[in-house]
């Protein structure tokens, strides 16, 4: 078999298997709860909190911010679980014992979560229109679609890095919960970035999501693709940087674990 | 009155399978089991894996409701008077789970002592005594996490003696222990026996039942196939001898052929590294050896011995020679 | 009957709570639920609610404390029975001659107190970081409200735990149950902002009355009559919850002995 098709197959299998294994215990109802109701509840909570704070203005700001932020459920939780899950299941030694291309193996774990995350954002924006009357009449939908895909991808990049961290610390839940809430603070979903202290702004700019959220807000308010193109380029760049960092950490982890014989310790 | 009375106990497990079309699968773990245990007796329940030993013990320990039959502990019904029964009994299930690994042994014991309403003054005195009894003296402040399997299993014994129960259920307590650990464990059981506790011990190690139990019930496929003293059970095979033949890489088909020989009453095998030990029960004793060797023609054979039957051989015969 | 148990078994409850605290202390998931998440929510809310009213820092500190309390009740107490099952300790607990709900009461007590203690420290820290002074308008009434809230949360948790075990369908909604209670109980913004039809739902949630009592006694917005109403509602709900929970526990344990689910996961 040709090396490219071989690796594509590996990529695809990693994708499907990690997804299926992770959600095997999920019944359709649970999936619905986590994909439809959880985002809804989060949007409602922060939108009310935000409009309570701002005296009823700026509802769109919070709705859009939190709708895009929803992608982190797949990008952070989903991806970290896909990677960290191998450790719990004890399958890591087998994985590292295969001759499979590590890069395909690694990035394959994130792929399905990109689709899943984008889907979640669309649902969340739908809730925004339905419940909070967010107006999409001036929106360039293809540019918004691209924004969603780009943001989701870059968030998954961070998720890959976090997943690797969880391999080292063995505290998947702790890592991904903390990152998720940090994103809520720093991504600009709920707090306008320019009102943050300078050091926090700097941190915001180094994160995925920040530019994606800004871009979505601009587009829904009637901005053009040209307005947001630079934002999207930096957004995807940041995501790729995190992903590559994660990949190096992953290969380092494999080497380290094999040297120290710690593959199975949880 | 007997301390423990089990009459026609029956217990079924139901498992649903299939996602869309749900099917209920029933497994009859205990079909019809009856036995009594006298006060202060050490009673053994012997059987292969899946015979229904653990299910029987869990019903007695008030952890399962029987589907049919009557089970009484000191005259109390295990369903209606579950809470009263619980005050009288202690139990351990083999294995190392069931402890708080992140706590020390002493903390584990203090915790369970409070659940059994042991007066704090009393438990302060009893916990060190129990640790000594089970050979964990001086290790009580360590986290259970770092304990060996044997230590965890002995800690379970201390746990179950906190409230000084009259009745103990020990379900395969020596499972997974190395020979030394198992021997130490049996010593603990002997100590309990000398304290006049009524004990139900399940095991699939024959010599364990033989050396410890006053009476033994052999259970197979959810039913009791024999119940007697170890020596009386051995009488089942008194007129037999056991021929042990050491073989190397024997073909399973040949084993079946030997099993069908007219003078063979029962046959079992033991795997030992690369060798297989054939245990043939026969009335003909040493006279059967030439015929047996003839049927193993062309195969590598090691040592051949003829000996008196043990309880294990009686058991093999009772459960149909498949152990 | 239930109350008698609580008094007879107080020593057991305290021991269970003590052991639970020590057992959970280095569990990172619990650390997150009780320490990190409420701290992050407090920082978030402090930023968002900047400049909305006089005593808003106090409001945010108490409100985010309540979010932590609810999350730990929902996730830690909600999963407490399953946690014992995974550890293999459930059988020994059930077979102890003590009502099982007494043990879970002790565990819930540990969780709630643990959240309260660690959170109050973290909020003081957050408030100091932001340079706010926290002023407690009615410290004695507030303390009394804290005790009643602890009791109300524990009792509410005693209904959640067996329900999660008996009806796995309900537990599937666990993640989706976290934020709605933040919203409906008015932890960080008044429920007056919500549509009218949700008000009765808020009224039947013990966390709502806890939030009212704690907010009113800390910010000084409520008069004594309002505070007494909230206390009364918490007491009534606690008693009703304890009553229902003892029925639920009995049903759950019988079912578990029939279905043989005390051990298997």
Image (cartoon, coloured by chain):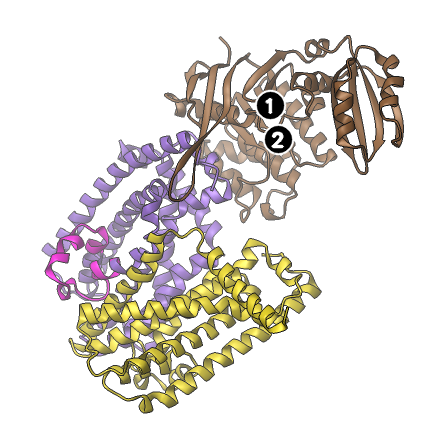
Does the magenta stretch mainly form a helix, a strand or a loop?
A: helix
Q: Give the SS element for disc 1.
A: strand
Q: Which mark is residue B173?
A: 2
**Does residue B122 appear to the left or right of A251 in the view shown?**
left
- Output the chain of dot 2: B
In the rendered image, the vertical position of residue A86 relative to residue A195, given as above or below = above
Chain ID, yellow in image: A
Q: Please give the name of the residue rendered at 60% of the width and 42% of the height, measured from the top-left corner.
A: B140
Whether residue B296 is visible, yes or no, is yes
User: In front here: B233 or B184?
Assistant: B233
Q: Give the magenta part as a residue range.
A: C181-210
Q: Colour of chain C?
A: purple
Q: Residues within 10 Å of mark 1 (few under 14, many from 20)?
A: many
In the rendered image, the vertical position of residue A218 relative to residue B288, given as above or below = below
User: In front here: C92 or A247?
Assistant: A247
In the rendered image, the vertical position of residue B306 relative to residue B179, given as above or below = above
| Residue tagged 1 | B201
């Amino acid at each position: 078999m040709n090396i490219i098709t071989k690796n594509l197959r590996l990529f695809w299998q990693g994708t499907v298997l990690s997804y299926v294994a992770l959600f095997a215990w999920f019944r359709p109802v649970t999936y619905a709860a986590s994909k439809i109701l959880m985002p809804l509840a989060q949007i409602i909570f922060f939108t009310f909190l935000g409009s309570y704070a701002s005296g009823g203005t700026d509802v769109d700001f919070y709705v859009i911010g939190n709708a895009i932020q929803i992608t982190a459920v797949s990008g952070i939780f989903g991806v970290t679980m896909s990677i960290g899950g191998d450790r719990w299941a004890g399958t890591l030694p087998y994985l590292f014992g295969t001759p499979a291309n590590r890069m395909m193996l690694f990035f394959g774990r994130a792929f399905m979560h990109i689709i899943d995350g984008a889907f979640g954002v669309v649902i969340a924006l739908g809730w925004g229109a339905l419940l909070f009357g967010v107006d999409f009449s001036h929106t360039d939908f293809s540019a918004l679609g691209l924004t969603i895909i780009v943001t989701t991808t870059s968030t998954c990049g961070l998720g890959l890095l976090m997943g690797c961290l969880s391999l080292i610390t063995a505290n998947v839940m702790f890592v991904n919960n903390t990152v998720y809430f940090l994103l809520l603070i720093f991504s600009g979903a709920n707090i306008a970035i320019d009102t943050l202290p300078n050091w926090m702004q700097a941190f915001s700019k180094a994160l995925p999501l920040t530019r994606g959220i800004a871009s979505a807000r601009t587009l829904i308010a009637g901005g053009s693709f040209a307005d947001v193109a630079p934002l999207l380029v930096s957004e995807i760049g940041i995501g790729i940087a995190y992903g590559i960092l994660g990949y190096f950490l992953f290969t380092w982890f494999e080497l380290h674990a094999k040297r120290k014989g710690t593959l199975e310790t949880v | 009155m007997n301390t423990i009375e089990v009459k026609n106990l029956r217990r079924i497990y139901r498992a649903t399978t299939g996602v869309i079309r749900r099917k209920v699968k029933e497994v009859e773990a205990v079909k019809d089991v009856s036995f009594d245990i006298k006060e202060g007796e050490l009673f053994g329940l012997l059987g292969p894996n899946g015979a229904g030993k653990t299910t029987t013990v869990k019903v007695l320990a008030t952890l399962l409701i029987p589907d049919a039959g009557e089970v009484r502990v000191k005259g109390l019904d295990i369903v209606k008077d579950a809470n009263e029964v619980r005050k009288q009994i202690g139990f351990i299930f083999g294995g190392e789970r069931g402890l708080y690994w992140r706590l020390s042994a002493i903390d584990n014991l203090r915790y369970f002592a409070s659940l059994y309403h042991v007066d704090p003054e009393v438990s302060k005195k009893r916990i060190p005594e129990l640790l000594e009894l089970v050979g964990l003296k001086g290790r009580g402040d360590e986290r259970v996490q770092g304990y060996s399997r044997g230590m965890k299993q002995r800690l379970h014994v201390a746990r179950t003696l906190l409230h000084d129960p009259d009745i103990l259920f020990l379900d395969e307590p020596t499972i997974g222990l190395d020979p030394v650990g198992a021997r130490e464990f049996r010593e603990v059981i002997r100590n309990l026996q000398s304290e006049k506790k009524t004990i139900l011990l399940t095991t699939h190690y024959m010599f364990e039942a033989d050396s410890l139990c006053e009476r033994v019930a052999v259970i197979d496929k959810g039913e009791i196939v024999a119940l007697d003293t170890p020596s009386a059970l051995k009488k089942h095979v008194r007129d037999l001898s056991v021929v042990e033949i050491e073989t190397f890489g024997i073909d399973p088909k040949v084993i079946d052929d030997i099993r069908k020989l007219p003078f063979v009453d029962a046959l079992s095998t033991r795997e030992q590294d690369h060798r297989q030990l054939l245990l043939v029960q026969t009335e003909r004793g040493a006279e059967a050896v030439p015929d047996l060797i003839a049927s193993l023609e062309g195969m590598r054979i090691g040592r051949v011995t003829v000996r008196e039957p043990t309880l294990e051989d009686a058991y093999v015969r009772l459960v149909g020679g498949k152990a | 009957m239930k109350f008698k148990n609580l008094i007879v078994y107080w020593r057991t409850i305290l021991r269970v709570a003590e052991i639970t605290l020590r057992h959970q202390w280095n569990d990172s998931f619990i650390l997150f639920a009780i320490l990190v998440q409420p701290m992050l929510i407090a920082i978030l809310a402090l930023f968002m609610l900047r400049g909305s009213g006089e005593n808003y820092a106090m409001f945010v500190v108490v409100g985010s404390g309540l979010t932590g309390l609810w999350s730990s009740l929902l996730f830690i107490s909600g999963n407490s029975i399953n946690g014992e099952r995974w550890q293999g300790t459930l059988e020994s607990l059930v077979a102890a001659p003590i009502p099982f709900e007494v043990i879970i009461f002790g565990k819930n007590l540990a969780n709630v107190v643990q959240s309260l203690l660690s959170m109050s420290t973290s909020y003081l820290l957050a408030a100091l970081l932001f340079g706010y002074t926290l002023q407690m308008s009615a410290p004695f009434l507030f303390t009394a409200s804290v005790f009643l809230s602890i009791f109300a949360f524990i009792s509410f948790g005693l209904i959640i735990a067996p329900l999660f075990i008996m009806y796995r369908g309900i537990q599937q909604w666990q993640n989706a149950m976290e934020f709605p209670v933040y919203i409906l109980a008015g932890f960080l913004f008044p429920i007056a902002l919500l549509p009218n039809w949700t008000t009765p739902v808020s009224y039947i949630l013990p966390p709502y009355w806890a939030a009212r009592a704690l907010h009113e006694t800390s910010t000084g917005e409520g008069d004594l009559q309002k505070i007494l109403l909230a206390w009364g509602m918490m007491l009534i709900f606690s008693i009703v919850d304890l009553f229902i929970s003892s029925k639920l526990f009995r049903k759950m344990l019988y079912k578990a002995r029939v279905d043989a689910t005390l051990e298997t996961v």
